[in-house]
């Protein structure tokens, strides 16, 4: 019951205790001011576009006025899941991603192992040389491969011509065009696997390795039964990361093959760009495809985060968090 | 035994060298083409070594403006600066401030980093049209800052987790406020990680093609300009194209050689953890 002019006793007590602890508390209460702008920017850049994409995907879109006009329920999703072109784009993305991931992992592991075994003193220089393809712009990578694979002036065709006396038109058959894209992707994304595996190999517990050697494990048995199981979480993280990288690729398909021949190498990113912006301007259709791609990615990303949170990615325990005790 | 061992080492090193030659051959070919005469580029036998000529660069200088380069520099420097300034305190807050939904917030930040660009491009495109930021350097800067933010947070979060809290606690007990402890103690201690993270996003933004390609046309950045050579269809200008590609590659190459330790740490951080 409130009496006018007389604050309630509880409030008075709270007032007093706040006054007593003022200097420490006031700073800690305002501590969110510094990181807040970052969180706001991130929230603005992710939530509105996401919900806007959902909204767009449920409507028909007027391409002249750039506004959504008519609510059509899940019709756009139906179109995506029943049109051969969009299904092909999803399938092609899967094919490219699977192959790139597989090759990147195999090459990455082999190179990391070679460096660690045979040239550990030069590791920084070797790593940085092997890393170069990764820090080169995807545009330059595509440009490189178009120079190398040019049917008339490219060195690969010119050398191969000496053996086969056949000109290989790399981007003219769906199979070869896909492999060209995969090659480009592998060249650019393997460095990541090399680096991760190399750090993984470096941080393996030496006692366990010694014990296995004493027990007589050697060669491939050693690799398969000891090294790889010990690096399990790194392998999982690398596989998922490579897969995500490859499934979002746009540049090689756009620049090397332009999705061709026909629509054979049209990846999902290229499909969305073409259908939504370049050709017909069916923005809602592209938005629906984007939402589907997003759902797939979120599933993969969730597994990834859960794995990295298993905290021994490099054998490091999470540090005790400041203030955890009084939370 | 020792002969076998020696053979093993020799085989391993040879394999490494051969792999490295194949690995870097595309880069060599790019540099070679950039310094070749047109006659050598279009010869019917491969030309492996040439005396460098600058014809292609001169042709570029005569036929192109410096605008894309200027846009690239502005966009990259601004967005990296914004992302680093905003992102470092975010990582610190996530690592050190206890609150109930911390795992959820952390998951949200990390997951934004994995959002597929193709899912965001359509809403970004329409929104940018509506707020009249399509084809502007400003619009691109905002988008790149937002994309880079989670990368910075992700890399630094792993670092702050590993860093023992005792130094900051000592500073707090000596009377530092929370954020002055952060700026005076934590930032100097984590400077190398911040540099590593900033270099990584610098390279990623400098190379970025997709968003720039879709969201800008006349006010575009360097990668899109370089890519326009490839889109030219029949008989592209291979020499100038390689020269332009080389110009685009030089800054990352310099970073790779002079900041190699940082770069390696940064890329490791990209996967969600730093090696010691």
Image (cartoon, coloured by chain):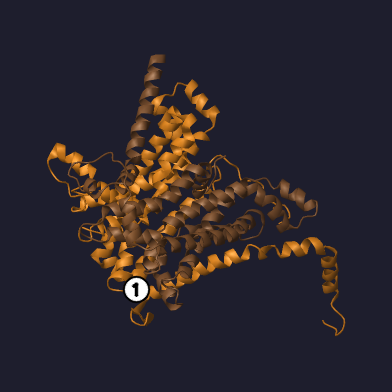
Work out whether B243 lies above or below A38: above
Q: Position of residue B186 (x, y in %)?
A: 67, 51
Please indicate whether residue B51 sits to the left or right of residue A21 in the image: left
Chain in orange (letter) = A
| Quadrant assignment, res B28 | top left
**Front residue of this view, candidates B252 and A68:** B252
Mark 1 residue crowding within 10 angstroms, few (<14) / some (14–19) / many (20+):
many
Please indicate whether residue B121 sits to the left or right of residue A16 in the image: left
Residue shown at the point (26%, 56%) measured from the top left? B237
Q: Is residue A154 visible?
A: yes
Please indicate whether residue A274 sits to the left or right of residue A109 in the image: left
Labels in figure, total: 1
Residue positioned most to the left: A165
**Front residue of this view, candidates B92 and B188:** B188
Residue positioned most to the bottom: A4
The secondary element bearing badge 1 is classed as helix
Q: Position of residue B111 (x, y in %)?
A: 49, 58
Q: Quadrant of the N terminus of chain B?
A: top left
Q: Quadrant of the C terminus of chain B?
A: top right
| Quadrant assignment, res B228 | bottom left
* Chain for numbered disc 1: A
Q: Is residue B226 visible?
A: no
Residue shown at the point (35%, 28%) measured from the top left? B14
Q: Position of residue B216 (x, y in %)?
A: 39, 68
| Quadrant assignment, res A90 | bottom left
Residue at the disc numbered 1: A283
Work out whether A179 lies above or below A194: below
Please indicate whether residue B59 sits to the left or right of residue A301 in the image: left
Q: Position of residue A158 (x, y in %)?
A: 19, 42
Chain B tint as drawn? brown
**Front residue of this view, candidates A130 and B112:** A130
Residue shown at the point (42%, 24%) measured from the top left? A218
């Amino acid at each position: 019951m409130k009496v006018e002019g007389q604050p309630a006793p509880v409030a008075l007590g709270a007032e007093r205790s706040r006054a007593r602890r003022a200097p420490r508390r006031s700073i800690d209460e305002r501590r969110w001011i510094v990181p807040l702008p970052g969180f706001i920017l991130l929230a603005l850049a992710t939530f509105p576009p996401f919900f806007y994409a959902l909204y767009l995907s449920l409507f028909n879109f007027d391409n002249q006025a750039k506004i959504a006009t008519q609510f059509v329920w899940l019709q756009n999703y139906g179109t995506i899941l029943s049109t051969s072109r969009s299904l092909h784009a999803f399938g092609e993305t899967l094919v490219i991603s699977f192959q790139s991931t597989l090759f990147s992992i195999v090459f990455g592991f082999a190179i990391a192992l070679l460096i660690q075994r045979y040239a550990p003193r030069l590791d920084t220089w070797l790593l940085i040389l092997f890393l170069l393809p990764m820090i080169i712009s995807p545009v330059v990578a595509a440009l490189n491969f178009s120079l190398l694979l040019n049917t008339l002036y490219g060195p690969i065709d010119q050398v191969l011509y000496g053996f086969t006396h056949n000109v290989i038109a790399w981007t003219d058959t769906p199979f070869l065009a896909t492999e060209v894209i995969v090659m480009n992707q592998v060249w650019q994304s393997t460095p990541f696997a090399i680096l991760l595996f190399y750090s993984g190999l470096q941080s393996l517990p030496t006692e366990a390795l010694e014990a296995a050697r004493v027990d007589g494990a050697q060669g491939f048995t050693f690799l398969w039964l000891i090294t790889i199981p010990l690096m399990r979480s790194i392998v999982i993280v690398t596989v998922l990361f490579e897969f995500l990288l490859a499934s979002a690729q746009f540049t090689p398909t756009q620049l090397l093959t332009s999705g061709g021949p026909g629509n054979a190498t049209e990846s999902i990113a290229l499909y969305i760009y073409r259908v939504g912006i370049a050709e017909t301007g069916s923005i809602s259709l592209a938005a629906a495809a984007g939402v589907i791609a997003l759902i797939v990615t979120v599933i993969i990303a969730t597994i990834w985060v859960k794995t990295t949170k298993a905290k021994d990615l490099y054998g490091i325990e999470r540090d005790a968090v400041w203030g955890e005790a009084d939370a | 035994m020792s002969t076998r061992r020696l053979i093993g080492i020799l085989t391993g090193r040879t394999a490494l060298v051969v792999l490295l030659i194949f690995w870097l051959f595309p880069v060599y070919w790019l540099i070679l083409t950039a310094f070749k005469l047109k006659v050598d580029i279009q010869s019917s036998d491969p030309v492996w070594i040439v005396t460098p000529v600058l014809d292609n660069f001169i042709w570029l200088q005569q036929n192109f403006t410096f605008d894309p380069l200027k846009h690239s520099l502005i966009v990259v420097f601004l967005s990296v600066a914004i992302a680093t300034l905003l992102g470092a305190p975010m990582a610190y807050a996530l690592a050190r401030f206890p609150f109930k939904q911390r795992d959820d917030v952390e998951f949200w930040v990390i997951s934004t980093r994995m959002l597929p660009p193709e899912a965001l491009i359509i809403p970004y495109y329409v929104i940018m049209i509506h707020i009249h930021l399509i084809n502007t350097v400003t619009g691109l800067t905002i988008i790149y800052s937002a994309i880079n933010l989670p990368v910075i947070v992700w890399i630094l979060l792993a670092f702050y987790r590993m860093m023992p809290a005792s130094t900051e606690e000592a500073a707090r007990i000596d009377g530092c406020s929370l954020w002055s402890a952060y700026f005076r103690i934590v930032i100097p201690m984590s400077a190398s990680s911040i540099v590593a993270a900033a270099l990584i996003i610098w390279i990623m933004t400098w190379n970025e093609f997709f968003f720039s390609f879709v969201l800008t046309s006349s006010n575009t950045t360097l990668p899109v300009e370089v890519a326009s050579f490839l889109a030219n269809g029949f008989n592209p200008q291979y020499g100038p194209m390689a020269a332009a590609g080389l110009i685009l590659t030089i800054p990352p190459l310099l970073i790779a050689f002079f900041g190699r330790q940082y770069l390696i740490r940064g890329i490791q951080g990209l996967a969600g953890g730093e090696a010691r």
